Amino acid sequence: MNDKTTGRDIEAILEDFISRDPANTLKNEVNEKAFDKPLVGFASGDDPIFEEYKDHVGPFYMTPWEIFALTYNDLEIKPDELTVISYILPQTTATKKDNRKENFYPSERWARARIFGEETNTALRRHIVESLKAKSIRAVAPALTPQFNVRISPEYGFSSTWSERHAAYAAGLGTFGLCDGLITPLGKAMRTGSVVAQMHIPATSRPYTDHRAYCLYFAEGTCKKCISRCPAGAISESGKNKQICKDHLFPVTSSYVKQNFGFDGYGCGLCQTGVPCESGIPPGKNGRSDS
Ligand code: SF4
Ligand code: SF4
């Protein structure tokens, strides 16, 4: 194993991909970039938080060790030999600006970012894995494994066997908002991804102890802007109703995207745009200051 690869090296792999790779595209006429400069964080494979996720979500939830051991058929590997690389891909200024203006359907850029941007994200996951393998570092992207699928959690309903947002939380990249999105230093209008690698990179500190610290509603009882932004009534003070949200995505937005933008897609993200947490941690007692 190559022990010399640093966290900065990993960041450079991601930044280079996002700034130069043609796979970072909305696939519109002028091939605009899908995402701006990423933010990267790291968590140790033996962080107890991953077992806590399993306890909360259900036994089907996979730890970094389980994913890695299954992928490489290596039960000897120790959790502390692994690092979870997590990243945030912020939506571009143009995409956010367009979606801010919408109040029912997604803007074209947003819908493109949901479909073609996620293709970018998939390509990035693969690129990180291949870049590490080229350095003789074994790595796997959990979301691209055969074990990745959606189950029903007794407590949370539809839940996947690995959560990119929870990996990002573990890697110090953000906390959850009332609408369920992850509020990061680059905001909530983003996509996220992760890779588990056999390497040691110091964990990024988590500048929070509460998993909802950055949300103004949970921190101060204010805001609730995502409730009024949701065209489907899926968000309330109790959180997001995943089924109502899903029923809006399919078929309401999927039909609209096909008819108006000419590709098979869907999307919404109104709760991620035109809200105080759209592009950063909103000012407040647990977030950044106004200064
Ligand atoms: S819009 Fe307001 S209430 Fe909703 S997640 Fe963001 S900060 Fe929290
Ligand atoms: S994605 Fe759209 S439908 Fe779903 S919760 Fe957010 S605003 Fe509501």
Image: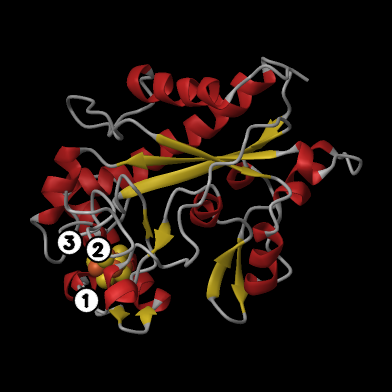
Residue at horizontal 50 percent and vertical 40 percent from the top: 41
Front-most of residues 116 and 20: 20
Mark 2 lies within 8 Å of ligand 1 (Cβ measured)? no
Q: In this view, does 139 lie above or below 153?
A: above
Badges 2 and 1: C-beta atoms under 8 Å apart?
yes
Q: Is ligand 2 less than 8 Å from the beta carbon at label 3?
A: no
Which is more foreground, mark 3 or mark 1?
A: 1
The answer to whether residue 252 of the structure is visible from this angle is no
Mark 1, Cα crowd under 10 Å, few <14 / some 14-19 / many 20+, is few
- Asked whether 229 or 277 is in front, the reply is 277
- Which quadrant: the N terminus? top right
Which residue does the image show at 48% across and 31% down from the upper left?
Answer: 124
| Residue 261 falls left or right of residue 162 | left
Mark 3 or mark 1, earlier in chain: 3
Foreground mark, 2 or 1?
2
Q: Mark 3 points at which residue?
A: 105
Judging by the rendered image, the residue that carries numbered circle 2 is: 284
**Mark number, residue 254:** none
Residue 78 placed where, x, y %? Answer: 84, 42
What is the distance, in whole Å, between disc 3 and disc 1 at their CAs? 26 Å
Mark 1 CB near ligand 1 (8 Å cut): yes
Quadrant in which residue 248 is drawn: bottom left
**Residue situated furthest left in the rendering:** 101
